[in-house]
Image (tube, coloured by chain):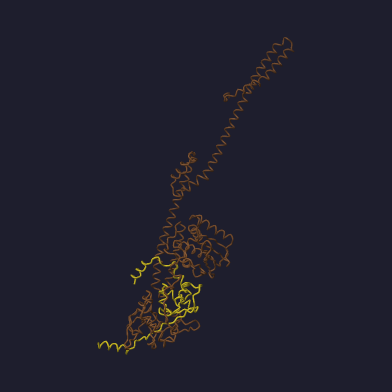
Chain colours: A brown, B yellow
Amino acid sequence: MVRVESPPTDREVPVVRVVLLPVVLILGATAAGSALVAPAARIPVAVCGAITALLVAVLTVALHRRRHAMRVQRAEYEQRIAYLDHRILSHDAETVRLTKEVMPAAIKRLSVGNSPEEVMRDIVDADVANRHLPKALREQIRQVLEVIDNEEARRDSAQRAFVSVARRVQAIVHRQASELREMEDHYGRSPEVFDDLLRIDHGTALIGRLADSIAVLGGARPSRQWPKPVPLYSVLRGAMSRILEYQRVDLHSIAKVAIVGTSVEPLIHACAELLDNATRYSPPQTRVHVTAVEVQTGIAIEIEDGGVSLSEEARARAENMLAQAQAGINMNDLGESPRLGMAVVGRLSRMYQLQVSLRQSAYGGVRAVLIVPRDMITTGPAPGIAHGIGATSRPTSSLDMSQLQHVVPPPGKRKPKPATGPVPSVAAPVPTGAAAAAPRPAVPAAAMEDDVPVVTEWTENGLPQRRSRGRAPLGSHNLPQQPPPAPVHANGTQPGRDQGAGDQGGGEKPPGLWLEAFTKAVNGVPQERKHGEDSDDAWDKGDLK
Amino acid sequence: MSGARRERRKADPDLHDPERLYVITGDLDTGGRDALDLVTMVVAQAQPSPTFQPEQAAILRLCQSPLSVAEISAYLGLPFSVVTSLLSDLLATELIESRAPIVRATLPDRSLLEAVMHGLQKL
């Protein structure tokens, strides 16, 4: 205890001073005592006093030393405690920094695609502040990173599996859809087959949307690419064609813009999901109204349904789901009975900067507003069926319709007629028949003989002139010089289905020749017709009254 | 026939519009088709208004002068059944009128044929 770090010299002086006072007092008392007592006792008293003084001096010195040592020790302890406190604080700070800065940075780096080793090297070793982390902490960081990496890899592979399955389904659906479209073109003239094809087509489109949803949730972008801009109207109808109850959707006042090709598919999908939500969560007899208007930031597509009103809580939940999806959801968060719609919409809106909001509708239901950003919109001419069909290639024909008989009498004038049997004259309406009894009956047999070589024109010498077959447009073969003498109508069969229906009119004329004329018409022959115009002119001159 | 179909598919795999035909046709169950034929002539009775479906507006535009159903189908690039379905809707609202084409003599004049035959034989 004496080996305290070299007590300063001024410390020695107080020791002497502290010792001096009691010793002097005792010595004084001893001197006084020895002076007062008898001379015989003077010696013992003096001896006792000296001994006492010595003892007190020694004790005082010892006491003082101990006190000094204690003080030094206490100071030392305090210093050590302070040091330890500091250590703890800095350790805490280090931990906090680790949690708040180092780990997020490391995880971020990991999520970019670096391996745990690379992250350790970049974040821990390369940083001066982190270089001296204790080994245990380093180990801890490494382990956490590896766990995350493994988990991430597992999730990635699961998602990739999802996406690849979805892609395959999409490919099949896509092929199926184009085949179906072909078949629809092919069987377009037999309504029963056609309607069935449409039903299959619809089912296929529903499957396709599901596959698209899975792909989107798996983190993939929509696979289908549209090479050219597509009108918004077509986009919305494309969305309609992917939901179950498309009949309930009404399109009102759709802005006349086109969507650039790369954004078409995601927009179709997002709209389809919103429309699906709207039709699914509203009573089956209500309509869903869709409008699309231009706003400052782009196009606002509003989808309103007349369903149950969205309570504030439900709305918050739905918006929350959207927000979650926008933040990037996990497949695991979807739950057992996944309501994929909102998750998909959220995903898509995050990928393509669409804005989605759900509000209370004026109809009482939900109004979903989808804002399409302006850079997805192009106002250039878009190809497609929705706009400008026939604007350039309108045929000019000048048939006098009043000469022709009604095929479908105007409402009010319709009267059921027997579906079969000859009809005596031209002026009489063609037998229309009840649609249920005989779908598409009443085809004049002459309709099928358009291309049979017949005499239709006459030279000045009165000789018959045969006209080249198939050049003239349908319906322009008739000349006023040759009034139809009471034609015999077909027996109510449809040319597409029963090719032999021409037996009454043409005998052994080859059936199906009308198809050639049809093909020619399809190929745009009406533009370059020569005989047709002739005949039209003749018609005009001869019979126009 | 099948060969021609394959040919055409290769030509335009992606040119189809996103909308499927059943959306254009409308409700499959309720929308009946009127007795329209490929050669039925159709003429519009009204001008297209913006509220119409684009295909119907196009039909009204096309049919300002009489046009056959086959031609409408060709111009619109839509199958016949779709066109008849659209036309049936328009007919129900009296926006178009449909007439059968003027029929020729279903049987050629027999004497004429004989005259031609004799003429040919004399050659």
Residue A240 % position (x, y): 48, 67
**Quarter-of-image position of residue A174:** bottom left
Q: Is residue A413 left or right of residue A465?
A: right
Q: Residue furthest left?
A: B123
- Pick whichever, A128 or A228, lies toward us: A228
Q: Is residue B94 left or right of residue A503?
A: right
Task: Tell me: residue A381, above or below residue A444.
Answer: above
Residue A177 % position (x, y): 41, 66
Residue A455 % position (x, y): 33, 85
Image quarter hosting the C terminus of chain A: bottom left
Report if residue A60 is visible in the image.
yes
Image quarter hosting the N terminus of chain A: top right
Q: Residue furthest bottom?
A: B111
Report if residue A243 is visible in the image.
no
Residue B54 % position (x, y): 47, 72
Q: Is residue B8 left or right of residue A131?
A: left
- Pick whichever, B14 or A459, lies toward us: A459
| Numbered-mark total | 0
